[in-house]
């Protein structure tokens, strides 16, 4: 991690009560879970960071499912991206040259798929790579297969969707897909 790796923890990652802490990789995740007598100690209020690569194109509230409670910022440099009832639901942290992401829960939804994808790219220091073969509409996925010279756009909803696909070299293509439709296209169009 310290040399540039990425780690994403969801729910109770690395949870093992030892030496007074529960999240054994709290220094990477930037958050810790209250337990035992620490629950009675007031933690400082955290103001969430409003603009971050991971939450850049999310709309509305994030669904954490059952989520977690009593999660607090444990590292000074950690950035909390979402808080509910004084509990950190989404946080990011730098650790040496590596990056850690904490998510309180992640049930399947189209928005959570986008959130996880963005978290993976951020943790891997590959933010710019996200925008190569990327659908601006989160309801439509784009899968690129450079070795075959083809890509596929998939509408994951029952409704017609319009999207812009960002391709390599700043090229764009506008598409309209019927519900549950997928189309294969040549990269050299």
Image (cartoon, rainbow, N blue to C red):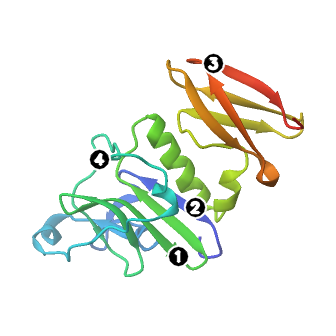
Which residue does the image show at 85% across and 37% down from the upper left? 187
Element class at badge 4: loop
Which is more toward the observer, 82 or 67?
82
Q: Mark 4 or mark 3, which has the lower sequence index?
A: 4
56 vs 152: above or below: below
Give residue 61's position: percent from left, percent from top.
32, 47
Which residue does the image show at 45% across and 42% down from the upper left? 112
Which residue does the image show at 37% across and 78% down from the upper left? 75
Look at mark 4 in the image and give the residue it sits on: 67
Name the image quarter holding residue 154: top right
Q: Mark 1 or mark 4, which has the lower sequence index?
A: 4
Q: Is residue 185 left or right of residue 84?
A: right
Query: What is the crowding at mark 3: few (fewer than 14 residues within 10 Å), some, or many (at least 20)?
Result: some
Give residue 104's position: percent from left, percent from top.
34, 52
Q: Marks 2 and 1, how far apart in space?
A: 13 Å
Q: Which label lies toward us, 2 or 3?
A: 3
Element class at badge 2: helix
Q: Which mark is residue 181?
A: 3
Q: Which label lies toward us, 3 or 1?
A: 3
Which is more toward the observer, 137 or 17?
137
Look at mark 2 in the image and give the residue it sits on: 122
163 vs 15: above or below: above
Which is more toward the observer, 71 or 134?
134
Element class at badge 1: strand
Q: Which mark is residue 138?
A: none
Name the quarter where the C terminus is drawn: top right
Q: Mark 3 or mark 1, which has the lower sequence index?
A: 1
66 vs 86: above or below: above
């Amino acid at each position: 991690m310290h040399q540039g790796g990425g780690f994403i923890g969801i729910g109770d990652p690395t949870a093992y009560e030892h030496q007074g802490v529960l999240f054994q990789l709290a220094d990477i995740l930037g958050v810790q879970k209250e337990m035992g007598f620490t629950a009675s100690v007031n933690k400082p209020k955290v103001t969430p960071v409003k603009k971050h690569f991971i939450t850049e194109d999310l709309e509305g509230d994030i669904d954490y499912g059952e989520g977690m409670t009593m999660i607090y910022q444990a590292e000074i440099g950690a950035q909390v991206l979402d808080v509910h009832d004084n509990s950190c639901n989404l946080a990011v942290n730098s650790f040496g040259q590596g990056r850690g992401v904490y998510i309180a829960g992640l049930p399947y939804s189209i928005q959570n798929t986008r959130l996880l994808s963005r978290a993976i790219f951020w943790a891997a220091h590959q933010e710019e790579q996200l925008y190569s073969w990327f659908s601006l509409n989160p309801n439509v996925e784009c899968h690129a297969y450079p070795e075959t010279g083809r890509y596929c756009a998939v509408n994951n909803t029952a409704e017609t969707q319009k999207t812009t696909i960002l391709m390599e070299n700043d090229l764009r293509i506008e598409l309209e897909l019927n519900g549950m439709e997928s189309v294969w296209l040549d990269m050299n169009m």
